[in-house]
Image (cartoon, rainbow, N blue to C red):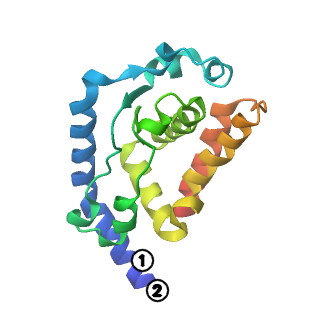
Amino acid sequence: MDEKEDKEIFSQLQQALPGVRKWIDRYVEAHAHLAVPVAELGFGRLPQYFDQSRLKNSKTVKVDRVQVPPLSKMGLPYFTDFEETLFVGITYMDTFFLAPPAHDCESTHFHELIHVIQWDILSPDSFLMVYAVGLLAHGYENSPLERMAYELQRAFEAGRSIPQLELQVREETMLVAKALS
């Protein structure tokens, strides 16, 4: 894509942002009665990586199927593949939704908690823009915010210590945001 196309897509993203936020807010609100703080799930290893306040304030919801906003209907047709992907987990602000394969998977909870931190650092609107630009520029697997979560998840799965995890996520997230803006 050339610079003019990039600006047009960025403008479309900004125009769609209020609708995407509204969809997310409604989705989270509709499932709030099912949300359980991560601290109450009894995972043994997550407290070694995240502080208690993060685990108390981050919530998970078990769903049959993870839902994403209908982005193509919101004027963003280049996200059709993303909409059609069957994700096992997705995070919206401080709440993440998990499909059956991941309901009780501590590693997936770890991954989604990384996204909770990213949402917190960037604010919802900035997170959505950075995530969308990362998807468009790099695809899902290589999207910078996803790549960060997957790399840290692999370290968690390997049992490696990750000193100052939240600080590391904060610093890397800010670098990603600067690089994509």
Q: Residue at x 48, y 21 (%)?
A: 38
Residue 37, horizontal then vertical, whole percent: 43, 19
Contact flag, marks 2 and 1 (Cβ < 8 Å): yes
Residue 2, horizontal then vertical, whole percent: 46, 86
Q: Amino acid at mark 1?
A: Asp
Q: Residue at x 53, y 54 (%)?
A: 177
Viewer-proximal residue among 170 and 141:
141
Left or right of 119? Residue 148 is right
Q: Regarding mark 1 in the picture, which secondary structure is present there?
A: helix
Q: Residue at x 60, y 19 (%)?
A: 51
Residue 151, horizontal then vertical, whole percent: 68, 47
Q: Which residue is mark 2?
A: 2
Q: Residue at x 64, y 17 (%)?
A: 44
Task: Indicate whether 94 appears above or below 148.
Answer: above
Q: Which residue is mark 1?
A: 6
Q: Amino acid at mark 2?
A: Asp
Q: Report which quarter residue 161 is drawn in.
A: top right
Report the disc number at residue 37.
none
Task: Indicate whether 107 appears above or below 84.
Answer: above
Viewer-proximal residue among 115 and 44:
44
